[in-house]
Amino acid sequence: MANICCPNGHYICDECHGQGVFALVKEYVLASESQDPLEIAKALMNFKDQVPMLGCENAWIAAGALMAALKNEGTLKITDAQVLEVLNRTHRQAIGGYCGLTGVCGIAPGIGACFSVILGAACPKDRETATTMTVVAKIINVIAQETGPCCCKNYVRHALTEAVALVKEILNISLTKSSAPIVCTDVERHPHGCRREKCSYYYNAAKGELK
């Protein structure tokens, strides 16, 4: 059974799709020393030969970048094992095409996995689980404002920007965030057509201005 195939009828299973990228993300985030999740995500998304324009590989990047930044910030004493747990949870939840099929972009459960691991959320818990679900709802809401067509790069950036604010609000931790404007370099890569002026990260080369 398959939900996604190319116009020529080719199909690739989820196990093979993105093969090798998970290892790339894992190795990079564990080695990173940055406290800026957007900086970490940008570096990973710039592996353009390995990381596709669209796909749940971007969800692994978002989750890994947030956990790596929190680990490097130091307050929560996050371990490599916790970073890997988040990545493995996200890998199981972020499945190709489910943003359209179920309305759940894989980045949302990825950020949710970060808070779940940090807070120790579980079915018997009260506040921890409720807080994690609230985080996921807020991430979904942010992403929903950026659809038409879907863009995983946009979603990663907006989700992490919101996640940084939620980390401050819920965990009282201030992560590093660059003041420099984010400029997308993937405009021509989008298979469904970039949203261009509708996207806050679009750079208009003709006018020499962002958006």
Image (cartoon, rainbow, N blue to C red):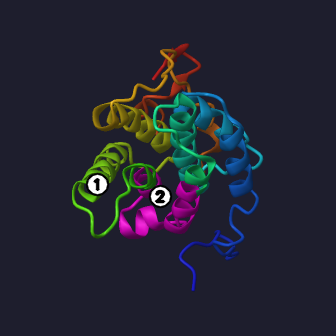
Which quadrant of the rendered structure holds the C terminus? top left
Q: Amino acid at mark 1?
A: Glu
The residue nearer to you, when weighing 42 against 196, is 42
Q: Residue at x 42, y 57 (%)?
A: 109
Residue 173 seen: yes
Place residue 167 in its image quadrant: top left
Residue segment shown in magenta: 85-112
Residue for point 52% across, 60% down: 90
Q: Is residue 149 visible?
A: no
Question: The residue tagged with tag 1: helix, strand or loop?
Answer: helix
Q: Position of residue 1 (x, y in %)?
A: 57, 86
Q: Earlier in the sequence, mark 1 or mark 2?
A: 2
Label disc, if present, on residue 128 of the rendered structure? 1
Q: Which residue is mark 2?
A: 106
Q: Is residue 100 left or right of residue 10?
A: left
The residue shown at (57%, 80%) is 2
